[in-house]
Image (cartoon, rainbow, N blue to C red):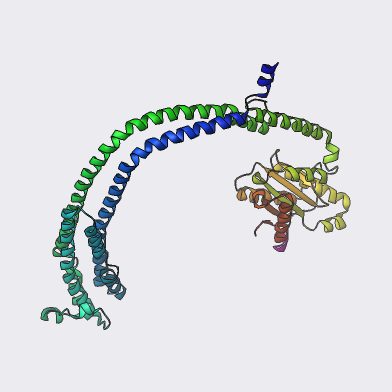
Amino acid sequence: MILKQKEKDGISLRRVHFWLIVGAVIISGLMFYSTYHLSTSFRSLTETSEQQIELRKAARELMDASDYLTESVQRFTVLGDKKYLDEYFTEAFGTKRREEAISRMSAANGNDAALAELQEAMASSLELMNREYYAMRLVIEAKRYTDYPDELKEIELSKEDQALSPEEKMQRASVMVHDEEYYVQKNLIREDMRASLDELEIMAYDTDASALSSLSKEMAFVRLVIAFQTIVILLMVWLTSRLGIHPVLNAVDQIKADSPIPEVGAEEFRYLARAYNKMYEIYKNSLERLNFKASHDELTGAYNRSGYDLLLSSVDLENVYMLLFDIDNFKEINDTYGHAVGDKVLIKLVSVLKRYFRSDDYVCRIGGDEFVVFMVHAAKPQQQQIEEKITGINRELANTEDGLPSASVSVGIVHGSESSDAEDLFRKIDDAMYQAKQRGKNTYSFYKK
């Protein structure tokens, strides 16, 4: 009798949860113990790697700064725009990335060879600046600038260059920073920088090899702990899947299929499944009692106000569009052609709506000439499709071949995800309808805040 009861109720999720926590604590303790022995070696390796990254970054910063100066002086000599002159001297004497690179390299230990190569690159860069200064002075003379850095005021042009015309000075300046001699000096900077990076790579390799040798001795024990951890985790995953995840996923599929939930899995889940199945049975019985006449409009066959209220209260806001249709000038149709014709226009509208929307969607009549359509299973934006539907609906309503007067509708549209509840959804669609009416007849409006 007790065994049968156990089989019916299942394993308690509370007990499983308790032992999962115990297992997690044991594994955590073992992992902490094993990783503690790795921490010193790993920390050393990390610090060394970070230092090497910073040093390589510093070495590259010098080249980047040199290239930036080259780009600025070349633009200045070609375009004559003084902003490039300002950018050049801001980098050279404001940002000072080259000097910062040397400073960071000097602060580190054990990289004398790399530092020496980088200092050579810096010396070459400073030497190249003399040529760039002269070229910029030629441009200043050609453009007759009066406000420029003091460093350039000390530059004196040769008599031959002084005698050149402004156009010739600009050409001479451009050649100086674009010719082969200029790029020979640039290549010297690059070669020194590459040599510095090579020295850093050698130092990094030696340091990493030593640190990795120390780490490898600790990894053997860690592997054993990880193997044990893997076995325990697989057991935890299997229990969790068997008692919780699989029953929940199965339950979701059954709910989507509008079916009862199987009573399997953990004791607590089985209790929830039994409670749901009872409510499901009550719900199905309630739906059966809601007959067609009670939930549908007698004239048009659309859902009536009662059916609309039920749908609105149970709609999935994250996956529905709500559209509010209002027949333009419906009172004039009744006054001109009589209520019998007006009723036929209403019937025609519902018929057109059902053709343009899917069989899964719901068409409701909530007032005299007001209709609501619920577009269900609409999680993604469908603005273009809705616009095409409304255009087609108004085109068919305007067709008078059936003997009915031409009609049109104004539509307010809102997606359920923009609302917090059903009441808020209706308020927003009412606002959207108001916006549509403000724009005139035969139109539509998507809700906007």
* Quadrant of res 156: bottom left
Residue 167 appears in the picture as rendered: no
Q: Residue at x 27, y 48 (%)?
A: 48
Of residues 368 and 49, the one drawn nearer to the viewer in this rendering: 49
Tell me if 334 is positioned left or right of 116 in this view: right
**x and y percentages locating residue 389 in the rendered image:** 67, 48
The C terminus is located in which quarter?
A: bottom right
* Quadrant of res 447: bottom right
**x and y percentages locating residue 228 in the rendered image:** 42, 28
**x and y percentages locating residue 365 in the rendered image:** 80, 47
**x and y percentages locating residue 157 in the rendered image:** 14, 79
The N terminus is located in which quarter?
A: top right
Tell me if 77 is positioned left or right of 384 in this view: left
Q: Residue at x 71, y 63 (%)?
A: 438
Residue 422 appears in the picture as rendered: yes
Q: Residue furthest top?
A: 1
Please say if 136 is above or below 421. below
Of residues 349 and 381, the one drawn nearer to the viewer in this rendering: 381
Q: Residue at x 31, y 73 (%)?
A: 83
Of residues 60 and 405, the one drawn nearer to the viewer in this rendering: 60
240 is within the stretch colored magenta: no
Please say if 10 is above or below 99. above
What range is drawn magenta here? 437-442
Tell me if 75 is positioned left or right of 440 in this view: left
Q: Main secondary structure of the magenta part?
A: loop
Q: How many marks?
A: 0
Q: Residue at x 79, y 32 (%)?
A: 282
